[in-house]
Image (spheres, rainbow, N blue to C red):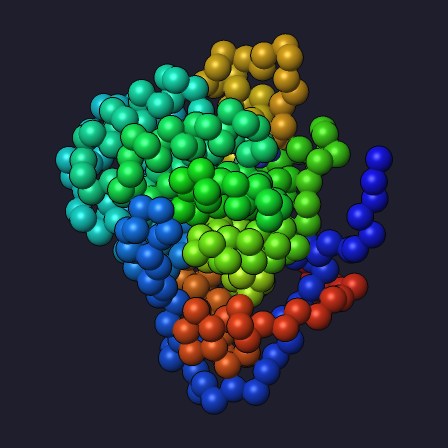
Amino acid sequence: MRVEDELKLGFKDVMIRPKRSTLKSRSQVSLERHYRFRNSDKEWRGVPIIAANMDTVGTFAAAQTLAQFQLLTAVHKHYQLDDWQRFLAGASDADCAGLMVSTGTSDRDFERLGAILALDARLNFICVDVANGYSEHFVEFVSRVRDAFPAHIIVAGNVVTGEMTEELLLAGADIIKVGIGPGSVCTTRIKTGVGYPQISAVIECADAAHGLNGHVISDGGCTCPGDVSKAFGAGADFVMLGGMLAGHDESGGEPIEENGRQYRQFYGMSSDTAMQKYQGGVANYRASEGKTVRVPYRGPLAATVQDILGGVRSTCTYVGAAELRELSKRTTFIRVQEQENRFFTD
Ligand code: 5GP
């Protein structure tokens, strides 16, 4: 047994220190980024925020709204081939530019991935997603996907440490998804005791990835626009959101009405709810690692997106970053023991 003494930081442990700035207004800030990826050599331009591949977040309807803002969507893996076919038939090039096709790591998943990608040459991104990115099988699967799809942009995760980030980039991934346990409907830390505070995970994985011309996604744990800015400040090239994008018209999720109030069901992809829905139950060798909750119904997704982008633009003006690209260079985190004032909370 070994203990690492250095304190690791999460969103609630830091704030961003304001800096002198010549920017007059947040309307002067551009959130657009332009990346070229290390293994596929593909380019992408847009606003690097991604809807999570959860069936109550990363839906086709959400993808269409998010595309209007140049955001990305990791489409959940429970759509059938004919759902994809129907969606792609009506989709514009802009709708497809930020679509990620999610896949697990079984042989069936591999076949399904190939079948979806074969539908449309406009599909650029593959998201190989497992709860635990530390298995040898996962690394081998990423290599297999790279061999089969040399020119697609491959996202792989999730991991939280530099050495595994490097290994996955060397195995063929372009972008590493970072986060174990911070998610709003995640119970991994409770069920297993495993995890890593997200700000430190992002700082360390981004450092490892950027050294190899790779990129990272901060996945999970953002509860407000300020957290999205903190993730970018920590060095994330992309930020993935689940709970913050749930509960909207486009998000899916069972509508619930109680005492005249509207809610939507939201659940983790390894929750009992998801496993009942897609696998007919929880296999007896595994525990569910996700919660089922209800979130207040929040109307159209566009309003929430504008709120998030407005917050991140405002962060940029506080630190003098005219473009999102400059945010991490201009970020100084201060360690804190307080966050917002919660006097008026309902
Ligand atoms: P959020 O933005 O809601 O805090 O986090 C979203 C992320 O939580 C997803 O992108 C995914 O990585 C993670 N996640 C989704 N469902 C589950 C689950 O059932 N269990 C765990 N451990 N993580 C989940």
Asked if residue 65 shows in the view, the reply is no
Q: Where is residue 114 in the image (x, y as percent from the top left)?
A: 27, 26
In the image, what residue occupies the spot 35% across and 65% down? 32
Q: Which of the pair 228/272 is nearer the observer?
A: 228
Q: In this view, does 41 lie to the left or right of 169?
A: left
Quarter that holds the N terminus: top right
* Residue at the left extreme of this rendering: 89
At x 72% / y 30%, what residue is drawn? 192
- Is 107 displayed left or right of 290 in the figure? left
Q: Locate the C terminus and report the quarter of the image it occupies.
A: bottom right
- Above or below, 247 against 230 in this view is above
Report the residue at 31% width, 46% height from top.
40
Q: How many numbered dots are placed on residues in this image? A: 0
Relative to 99, residue 26 above or below = below
Quadrant position of residue 338? bottom right
Q: Measuring from the top left, give residue 185's x and y in whole percent.
A: 60, 37
| x, y percent for residue 111 | 31, 20
* Identity of the residue drawn at 22% across and 35% down: 87
159 or 41: nearer the eye?
41
> Please, is residue 231 above or below residue 281 in the view?
below
Q: Which of 252 and 325 is in front in this view?
A: 325
Ligand 1 located in image quadrant: top right
Q: Quadrant of residue 126?
A: top left
Q: Can residue 345 be seen in this view?
A: yes
In the picture shown, does residue 300 fall above or below 232? above
Residue 190 picture location, percent across and down? 73, 33
Quarter of image, res 253: top left
